[in-house]
Amino acid sequence: DFPAAAAAVAAAAAAVVLPAPAPVDEAVEEEHRRRLGAWVESQLRQAVERKVRRDAPQLGSWHGRLEALAGRAAASLHPEPNRSIGTILKIKTLAGGSAADSRYVDGVVCRLRLADKRMATRLPSPRILLLDCALEHEAGGVSTSLEGLGRQEDEHMTMVVAELAKLRVDLLLVSGSVCFTAKTKLLEAKIALVVKVKPQLLHRLARVCGTVVYRSPAQVLGAQPGTCGAWRVETITVVEPSPSLADPPLAAAPAGGATAGGATAGGATAG
């Protein structure tokens, strides 16, 4: 019957002694890896060349630089299955400059402004907290004097900043406005502050920094700050080129510094 036949086949298969696998030749494996790497580089080079020739023939001199940026992105970015690399790769341009000014940033590049120029512009391995709200004292329904409101705001912001200091936060990004009292106390606590950050950007930073976006100052209590390799604010002076009137439109100087990962004037980088 069938069960008996299946058992006999299984027993026969178990009795088969497979030969030992042949020893791995490391030199052969290394040669295979080298050839595969060369093939990948060749395919990438051809893809960039076809793209430039088809969509931007006037940028032929950029071929080498674009190939280098594309290779760096392909080696370091790993999108989720069935998702385009465009979901995690951003390309930004600045007017002026040259192909040599282009660079790859392994992180998030965005246009941000510090609340005070005396705040830190470079932080190694910072602890980062993200707030999708305003950082202001909300007066209760009971009428009180301006002096009383000022005292309440000072006490409230003192508690918030003290909690941030306890969490050893180095950088605070807020989507809303921040009252003057909070800015002053954050500056005294040596906590860098960025205001008016778009919620979409906050969520991008949360994914990169391994944290969440908090929606109220009350949630600062017991919050878990995120971190990144480094934070820096870099101011870039953009000079618009002045093409000659005799030049045809396509001969005008191309937009400078195409950056894989992005670059904007006054950009802040978390990477």
Image (spheres, grey):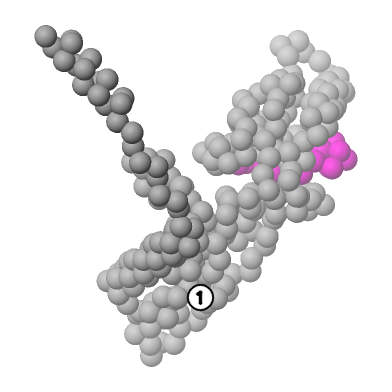
Q: Is residue 246 above or below residue 146?
A: below
The spot of residue 12 in percent (x, y) is: 25, 24
Q: Is residue 185 magenta?
A: yes
175 horizontally vs 84: left or right: right
User: Element under label 1?
Assistant: helix
Q: Residues within 10 Å of mark 1 (few under 14, many from 20)?
A: many
Q: Is residue 142 left or right of residue 256?
A: right
Report the span colored magenta: 183-199
Q: Quadrant of the N terminus?
A: top left
Magenta stretch holds residue 132 = no
Q: Residue at x 57, y 54 (%)?
A: 106
> Residue at coordinates 45% horizontally, 51% vertically from top-left?
23
What residue lies at 21% left-to-right and 17% top-to-bottom?
8
Q: Position of residue 170 (x, y in %)?
A: 77, 40
Question: Can see residue 91?
Answer: no
Quarter of the view holding residue 171: top right
User: Which amino acid does the dot numbered 1 rest on?
Assistant: Ala
Q: Does 162 appear above or below 49? A: above
Pick the front one: 210 or 111: 210
For disc 1, the marked residue is 99
Observer-nearest of 35 and 201: 35
Question: Looking at the picture, how far across and down is residue 271, in whole percent?
Answer: 63, 50
- In the rendered structure, the answer to whether residue 226 lies left or right of residue 168 reads left
Indicate left or right for 215 with 23 as reference.
right
Q: Position of residue 94 (x, y in %)?
A: 52, 66
Q: Is residue 122 above or below residue 153?
A: below
Q: Is residue 28 above or below residue 220?
A: below
Question: Quarter-wise, where is residue 169 in the image?
Answer: top right
